[in-house]
Amino acid sequence: MRRHLQLSIKQLTESYINGQLSPLSVAEKALAESTNLKTLNAFVYIAAEQALQQAKESVRRYAEQKPLSFLDGVTVAIKDNFCTKNIPTTCASRMLKDFVPPYDATVCSRLKEAGAVLLGKTNMDQFAMGAGTVDSIYGPTKNIWSESFSEDNWRIAGGSSGGSASAVAAGLCYAAIGSDTGGSTRNPASYCGVVGLKPTYGLCSRYGLIPLVNSMDVPGILTRSVSDCVEVLNTIAGPDAQDSTTIRKPYKKLQLPEIDQIDLRSLRIGIPKEYNCEGLSSEVLETWTKVADLLECAGASVRQVSLPHTAASIFVYSILNQCEVASNMARYDGIEYGHRAADERSTEQLYAQSRAEGFNQVVKTRILTGNFLLLRKNYDHYFEKALRVRRLIAEDFTKVFEPPTIKDQVDILLTPTTLTEAPVYKDFAALSNRDQCAVQDFCTQPANMAGIPAVSIPIRLSKAGLPLSLQLMSNNLNEQLLLTVARWIEAQVEFDCLESLQRHAACI
């Protein structure tokens, strides 16, 4: 195993400063490994030339003792729905297969300004519509924790940011950017055994993120440790004049306390009873209980709470998702940009044929359903009602984080991230995209509906040797406490994200 992978981002940059490692050698090894682990299909595009040039510039800065930040020379990957200047951005679709943006998404430009080395673009479900990273024109992404890679017996990486999660879990990069609309960062983080953060809505700019659901989309962060996650968040967060939905308040960089300085005696943990739902595996339930006990033994107050509209949340999410998808996908007409069909008998025929060829069945289904729900006769009955229930879902969280009486308040909610370990591909593919999303997003999408921050952290391995993770949620802009508690749990469970590499070496 490459020894530098055991280092945190801070330790890596310190080794650059003292000359033990070089950004160029780390980038070269990462590019070589991305070829060796091609079977995972984590990347859809490798920007080798650009990455090596960025690494050389980083070497020069360290030689001059002028590094730009703690991310200078650190290898990162970007999900294929973030615009990257002069690098293809396809959303894993035929519609955008030849699209090369002339600009960087804000998230990407801030990483570059910090000196990060961009390795390439990662695989995803087409237009981020999925929970397995299996609906991509480039083929599915495989989970490095899989016991076997033969036929259809491998484990899915989760989605829709499965490529980013797989790349981090396989040690191909130190961090990756995903997007999170209903759990698309936390779901693959859970299955791949890495940390996945969905920040507060508006904390990180969406400029340059090709939209799925504007009111819920958030850039997400995937790393192998909570401290690494904080380094990336500190780099990409903050107001952006290009995105009117970003929070205007200046961002104050997070600084987590050392493990021995974290005191949980004043912490109040809520366990939402509605998350103990049908389909929750016994191993995930046992993991959930053990971590709750761990927190209680450390002095935290742990009690059951209720989020009564949780059961309705997945249905509301589905309706709003499809309505916004129908609106956002209307821009792809084969005329201004994107795939253009050969049939030019009329504008209408060109428009229809381009969309028929450019979108897969999943995207087409959501567009059709969304347009149906937005019809005048259906608008009040579906879209308007869904918005009202969404408000109730958000109020559920407000009532536990900011109740009328202080004795009913909790600081953190502890829940499962996913209901089971990563499923085998053939079992996952047996259900439709719609049915899988209803199952996979159950625990994650309420945080998007409310706009609150949430993080998934790996806890232990199942009996099958696969990662089991839990999710922490907190009030808006409470990332400091959220990630402090996550770091404490991480230190107690001592989950080894890189054990997957040894497993992979054994099964090939």
Image (tube, helix red, strand yellow):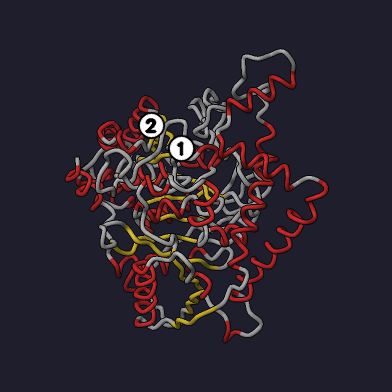
Q: Nearer the viewer, residue 268 or 464?
A: 464
Q: Residue at x 39, y 66 (%)?
A: 281
Q: Are marks 2 and 1 in contact (CB under 8 Å)?
A: yes
Instruction: List x then y, in percent, for residue 436.
Output: 49, 51
Q: Residue at x 41, y 54 (%)?
A: 229
User: Is the residue 259 above or below the residue 12 in the image?
Assistant: below
Question: What's under tag 1, amino acid-wise?
Answer: Lys
Residue 184 falls left or right of residue 338: left
Residue 418 falls left or right of residue 445: left
Report how many numbered discs are placed on residues in the image.
2
Image quarter of the C terminus: top left
Q: Residue at x 72, y 42 (%)?
A: 371
Question: What's under tag 2, amino acid-wise?
Answer: Gln
Residue that label 1 marks? 112
Picture disc at residue 396: none
What is the secondary structure assignment of the residue under circle 1? Answer: helix
Residue that label 2 marks? 54
Q: Would you identify the image quadrant in which residue 393 lies?
A: bottom right
Q: Would you identify the image quadrant in which residue 287 lies?
A: bottom left
Image quarter of the N terminus: top left
User: Is the residue 35 above or below the residue 178 in the image?
Assistant: above
**Separation (CA) of disc 2 from disc 1:** 9 Å
Residue 158 falls left or right of residue 403: left
Whether residue 66 is visible: no
Instruction: List x then y, in percent, for residue 480.
Output: 48, 65
